[in-house]
Amino acid sequence: MLVALLALFVALGGVGYAAITLPKNSVGAKQLKKNAVTAKKVRKNAVTSPKVKDFSLLGRDFRPGELPAGAQGPKGEQGPPGPTFAAAATNNQFGGASDPSGAPDETSEQATMQGRHFDFTSPVGGTIYVRLFVPAWGSTCSGGVAQFALYLDGAPVAGTAQLLPASGVPVEAVKLTSAAAGPHSLEARYDCPDGNLSTSSYRAIPTWTVLLLGN
């Protein structure tokens, strides 16, 4: 019995001695079981930055919010402006829209005097939405029916020619077209395809709207 107790004492004493006399830097990855070291099993401030190998920990080793925010990166390039979809149409009670004449009867100078000229500058090239509204406009021709259309930089905008009644009525034109980056001009000019202009009535100031929708 005495020998057994002595053996037990020596065994327990050896374990205790080994537990408190580990040499410095003697515990490594091979001595640790998988998931052996957790927050509950590490004494507070026991594991500090100098004792952790650089770049050895992963983001999943930290709780949300524990990692400090990194430095803000440089600002990226400006993306193309505008929505991803747009549509425009003019419902003319006097007839559907058609392609305008390349040489209308009304000159650019005459349209400018009536306020139907608009200059704008597009920051980038892309699709533009154009809207013209005139509160009262009417014309008559020596033959046929008068019409008006939109012109971008002096060139006719396809699908914008509309009939222009003799009596001054509100008229509107909307269109999606394309424009390169830089300055541009828009005009609304009348034309008499089958004759010459006889009379014209024009009142109030027209309103222009131009929106850049994107590339």
Image: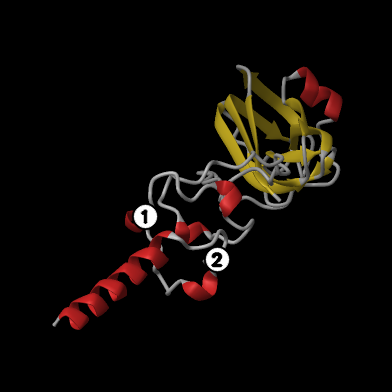
Q: Which residue is drawn at 31% across and 68% down?
A: 13
Residue 162 has which mark? none
Q: Which of marks 2 and 1 is nearer the N terminus?
A: 2
Under mark 1, the amino acid is Ala
Residue 39 has which mark? 1
The image position of residue 103, as x and y in percent, is: 86, 42
Q: Name the residue under label 2.
A: 26
Does residue 171 sit above or below 201 in this rendering? below
Answer with left or right where residue 128 lies relative to residue 29: right
Answer with left or right where residue 46 lies relative to residue 124: left
Q: Residue at x 57, y 53 (%)?
A: 51
Q: Can residue 40 be seen in this view?
A: yes
Answer with left or right where residue 185 lies relative to residue 61: right
Q: Which residue is drawn at 78% across and 18% down?
A: 113
Hey, which quadrant is residue 16 in on the image? Answer: bottom left
Hey, which quadrant is residue 17 in on the image? Answer: bottom left
- Indicate which label's residue lies in the foreground, 2 or 1: 2
